Image (cartoon, rainbow, N blue to C red):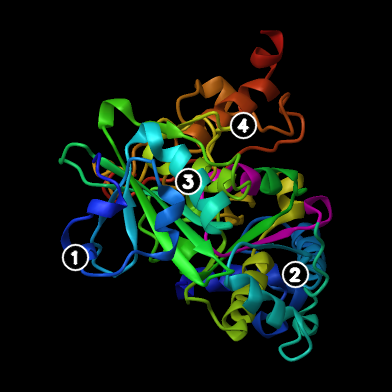
Amino acid sequence: MSTTESSTTGAAEATPAPRWAAALEGIEHRRVASADGLDTLEVAREHLHQLLAALKERAGFAMCTLVTAVDHYPATPRFALTHQLLSLEHSERIRVRCWLRDDDAHAPTCSDLWPGANWSERECFDMFGIRFDGHPDLRRLLMPQGYDHHPLRKEFPHAGIEPDRLYRQWDRQRRVGWSEEGAAQ
Amino acid sequence: MGSLESGSLRAVSGDASSGGPMAADASGSGFFATRADWLVNWGRKNSLWPMPLGLSCCGIELMAMIGPKFDLARFGAEAARFTPRQCDLLIVAGTLTWKMATAARTIYDQMPDPKWVIAMGVCSSSGGMYDSYAVVQGIDSIMPVDVYVPGCPPRPDAVIDAILKLQKKIEREAPVAKLLGLGAAERDERGTGKLVYQPNHGLSKGVLDKHPHDPKGKLGLRDPAPRKTENGKP
């Protein structure tokens, strides 16, 4: 985890140093092999924001196309928080992965670097329950506000957990409000 | 529809072939009420005002149905209005999610009586292929449905067929006889959807019996009674 790009291991070793390698000098990260051949970096949570900022400012990755997570339950650490970046200038993509533990699932936001990552992070929070520190408006994006569960976690059942609870609650409150008993309360 | 019932239905709908207006009234509603019912139903069924609730791809077929090629105007139901206050036919076209369900039910409640509902497509009829935590498994969970249209999405012809079936259903209603209390209310088949989830479940019966628009019971409105399911479970 503490090696710089000059001492990369595995499949990445045979390839020449990539264009963006110089931009990441001094930031702890690790270059790993990926099944789809996309350049992938793994980084600890403490250095995630620094790495992303360097990729944006010094390596030209001006666009954050995706912020999501992969649930590797029951492995530990469990969540692989994934950022995929695109450089329109150099026509390059890169993936940044950050492992998060179940009991400690939070990461720094990158919505200050790419405003478009705001909703991606909201979706990631909604689906996986990963909290983004410093996010300006971390509400659910897809599921209704007030829902208790995170549907893309592995333990979430296919049919859902009380999918109609919030609707029933709304329905009940509205009817009580229209009745005379409700009006008297 | 059994042959025994069809005799009385014809008498209500005023079909001349069954003996004309002087035919024996099997429903017991009397001459005036049956004639007035026929007239009211004739007006209602030939000027349905649809409220299009296009939620996914079914909405595209719905537009095609209203457009010139399939021409819903032939059946008097082409005047779609995007405010529920002016509509009496809710066409739920597409996948209804639980998050959208509150909005859909609000639209249904805002429509003035008499009102009918068509569930267009398998998603709104039964959840369709979305056997999922996010999707309502049939809109009859939250509102009564008159006609279900299968298809993914159904062709415009299928929805026109549903509207013709709904017109036949409207013919069998007895609004005037019901108003006069002539014992014809049981022919009112509106909203015969199975309503698996009881929309007001968990409430005391006194609250349940009250219609949201009629809390004092002066208008005789009430919510459709919860239907029983086959296995007793939702």
In the picture, measured across the screen, residue A142 lies left or right of residue B157, that is left
The magenta span reads B83-105
Tell me the element at label 2.
helix
Quarter of the figure with residue B174: bottom right
User: What's the residue at 52%, 28% (across, down)?
Assistant: A169
Residue count near mark 2 (Cα–Cα under 10 Å), binned few <14, some 14–19, many ≥20: many
| Same chain, labels 4 and 1 | yes
Q: Which residue is mark 3?
A: A52
Where is A69 relative to B48, above or below? above
Residue count near mark 4 (Cα–Cα under 10 Å), binned few <14, some 14–19, many ≥20: few
Magenta span has B101?
A: yes
Q: Which residue is mark 1?
A: A11
Q: Nearer the viewer, mark 2 or mark 3?
A: 3
Question: Quick check: can you spot residue B137?
Answer: no
Residue A35 vs residue A119, the one in the foreground: A35
| Same chain, labels 4 and 2 | no
**Which residue in the rendered view is the most extreme toward the bottom?**
B69
What percent of the width, then of the height, locates residue B49?
79, 65
Q: Earlier in the sequence, mark 3 or mark 1?
A: 1
Circles 4 and 2 in contact, beta carbons < 8 Å = no
Residue A44 vs residue B89, the one in the foreground: A44
Residue A136: image tag = 4
In the picture, measured across the screen, residue A20 lies left or right of residue B87, that is left
Residue count near mark 1 (Cα–Cα under 10 Å), binned few <14, some 14–19, many ≥20: few
Give the alpha-carbon distance from disc 3 to disc 1, as whole Å. Answer: 23 Å
Give the alpha-carbon distance from disc 4 to disc 2, as whole Å. Answer: 53 Å
Name the subunit of mark 3.
Answer: A
User: What's the residue at 60%, 77% (across, down)?
Assistant: B159
Give the alpha-carbon distance from disc 2 to disc 1, as whole Å. Answer: 72 Å
Where is B180 relative to B73, above or below? above
